[in-house]
Image: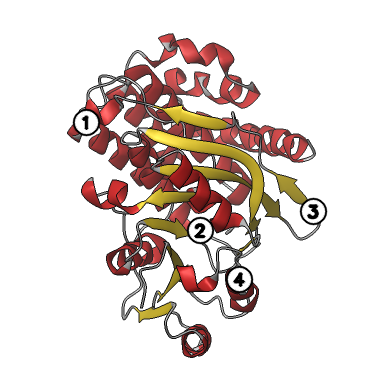
Amino acid sequence: MKTPLISVILPCYNVAPYLPRCMKSLEEQSIGIENLELIFVDDASTDDGATWNAILDFEAKYPNQVIAIQHEENKKQGGARNTGLRYASAKYVGFVDPDDWIEKDMYKVLYDKAVEYDCEVVCCRMYTEYATRWDLSREMEEGLHAYEKNAACGGDKRAILPGGVFVKLYRKSLILDNSLWFPEKIFYEDNYWGAILSCYVKRYYAMNDVFYHYCSRNDSTVHSKQATHHLDRIVIEERKLEKYREIGVFERCYREIEIEFLQLYYINTLTLLARRWEEIPYEVYVRLCEGIEKNFPDYQNNPYLKYKDLIFELLLPMIAMKLSEAEWVGVSEVLRDQIREIAAVLAKG
């Protein structure tokens, strides 16, 4: 049996209703299913075998292309992707979430660009499909982007990789040679993985072709109401700082990492909780403020702040105010309503 061109890893958890559409889009890839290695990892699904049986049926249909793996313990998407990476035999790797689907030319076009430009990563764009509408991801600066000496190799720049984990094709050696494993048993793992990977990328190609269909579900991780796993994003951002320091990137890219931390750790967390929780706990506010002041005591002088938006202007002053619990109760209710209003306006475009 010939070596596949691309290994596609699909982390699966209770996704039986969505698998047929996803599988069909993989079957119809113009690069040829015979050139793909499709690695399905059932992450200890709890749907009475529905997900696992669907995977086994697909494996029976394509025994030379499909690898079916079943976890005994749930390790979340990061753990499932790590398992898939350990089985991947192709030179290039892609990730698809099984409740999504892809256009038939996606992997052929991405693969051809990777070979033509000798790239470690190739990016495309995606549609986000909601119940009543769909949104198109923003346009990119199309073409080859080179970082001859990236941050992890002594330079002061990181690759700016647009889009999520699943809209890209990766050279497997980039991942394995640098031990770029996903965090396991925690949500928002892709925020960590994509950021750390960007420190190592030397050449990537960005294109404005739209190949990936991301399906936004009301019961998804990001949209869950009152879910404590939303606090995982705080842990993920703290882990990123630890890793930046470990690989020698923190000081070289200090201001860029600082504004990233302000955005993802503080602004995005409060914005998400305002939209998903009825109340934003005081202890979360305190933890976020302490995390910023500990790691970036000079944050107010960051030169990138002048480019930030209305939500930044709304939330950033709360750090220095050091509100008491009683003060936070009143302020957070107002913030919650304002953030929801701003988010609704932005959603309408």
What kind of element bears circle 2? Answer: loop
Please tell me the numbered disc located at residue 245: 1
Amino acid type, callout 3: Arg
Marks 3 and 2, Cα distance to the nearest angstrom?
25 Å
Q: Residue at x 51, y 18 (%)?
A: 317
Which of the marked residues, 3 or 2, is nearer the chain's N terminus? 3
What kind of element bears circle 1? Answer: helix
Instruction: Name the residue tied to disc 2.
Output: 227
Which of the marked residues, 1 or 4, is nearer the chain's N terminus? 4
What kind of element bears circle 3? Answer: loop
Instruction: Name the residue tied to disc 4.
Output: 22
**Image position, residue 51 (x, y; %):** 51, 83
Marks 1 and 2, Cα distance to the nearest angstrom?
30 Å
Which of the marked residues, 1 or 2, is nearer the chain's N terminus? 2
The label nearer to you, 1 versus 4, is 4
Q: Are marks 3 and 4 in contact (CB under 8 Å)?
A: no
Amino acid type, callout 2: Ala
Res 317 visible: yes
Check disc 2: other Cα within 10 Å, few if <14, some if 14-19, many if 20+.
few
Check disc 4: other Cα within 10 Å, few if <14, some if 14-19, many if 20+.
some
Instruction: Name the residue tied to disc 3.
Output: 133
Which of the marked residues, 4 or 2, is nearer the chain's N terminus? 4
Q: Residue at x 54, y 37 (%)?
A: 206
Res 281 visible: no
**Image position, residue 216 (x, y; %):** 65, 58
